[in-house]
Image: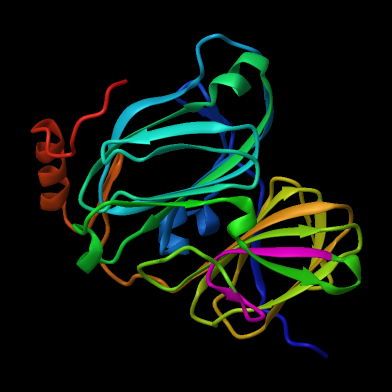
Amino acid sequence: MKEYKAIEEVLSPSASHMVGDGFKVVNFSPGGESFGDRMSPFFLMDFNPEFNFTPTKEPRGVGVHPHRGFETVTVAYKGSVAHNDSTGNSGVINPGDVQWMTAASGILHKEYHEKEFAKKGGAFEMAQIWVNLPKKYKMSTPKYQAILNDQKGDYKIGNGNGNVLVIAGEYNGVKGPAKTFSPVEMYDIHLNENGEAEFNLPADFNTGLLVVEGEATINENTIAHAHQYVQFKNEEGAIKIKANKKSVFLLLSGEPINEPVAAYGPFVMNTVEEIQEAIDDFKGGKFGQLAN
């Protein structure tokens, strides 16, 4: 009998709350802890399940805000978001695209529904993951990686079962384009009804699976429904996903960063003193300039 990585728990989402006026998100607390306590190097996951926004002339979103000490990774499933930051990067992420922003030493950022999408309204679905940085990289130069849908590594599962799109890391010899500061595996998985995929990840990596859409049987005996999150134990074994209907999943797996964490709002550092320094630097204009 095949050895599977044990499931620690299957979590339903928290009550939704608004981030700005453009993102209606839910969160997960594996083990009753903060996401970052259990899923390092992933610090937070804001998931916006499909929600229909009404048309508007003024795009909804989040105005100018700072970040330091980590990365934001936004995966778009439905709808479009325009973004700008204080290093001069800007662009639009459409369904399937990924925005991977390394805030590192400090950046100002804003993100709004793209103008044409805002005018028409419609289905909006996205996930944003905060990825912590090891101490030695926290004050490195900010950077930006724009990953279009067709730039992801594309592993086609046989017999029309579906695709594993690799954002970061490697799956069955197919590599993802994202450059990371610590070992990270991030897969955008699309399975057709009865489609199956199997994953073998290091025992010491923290690993979780978000059911974005659909329903699946995990490891042959556990059902996970849409918008639920599956936390796996840190042990040897495979992960098997069988889609009970056409489904979309986001798999996160990474080597824990075993360093102290001090966090306050949009800053993720190692000490309280570094948090205060981040606040002072932000107030002092050291994160650059960005108009609202």
Work out which quarter of the rendered image holds the N terminus and state it. bottom right
In the displayed structure image, the side of residue 278 where residue 99 appears, left or right: right
Write down the quadrant of residue 219 in the picture.
Answer: bottom right
Instruction: List x then y, in percent, for residue 3.
Output: 73, 87
Instruction: List x then y, in percent, for residue 246.
Output: 86, 52
Would you place residue 147 above or below residue 265 in this image? below
- Towards the viewer: 94 or 279: 94
Residue occupying the point 20% across, 51% down: 105
Work out which quarter of the rendered image holds the C terminus and state it. top left
Residue occupying the point 80% across, 71% down: 157
Residue occupying the point 67% across, 80% down: 172
How many numbered marks, from 0 up? 0
Instruction: List x then y, in percent, for residue 107.
Output: 25, 42
Magenta region, residue range: 162-174
Write down the quadrant of residue 66 in the picture.
Answer: top left
- Towards the viewer: 273 or 177: 177
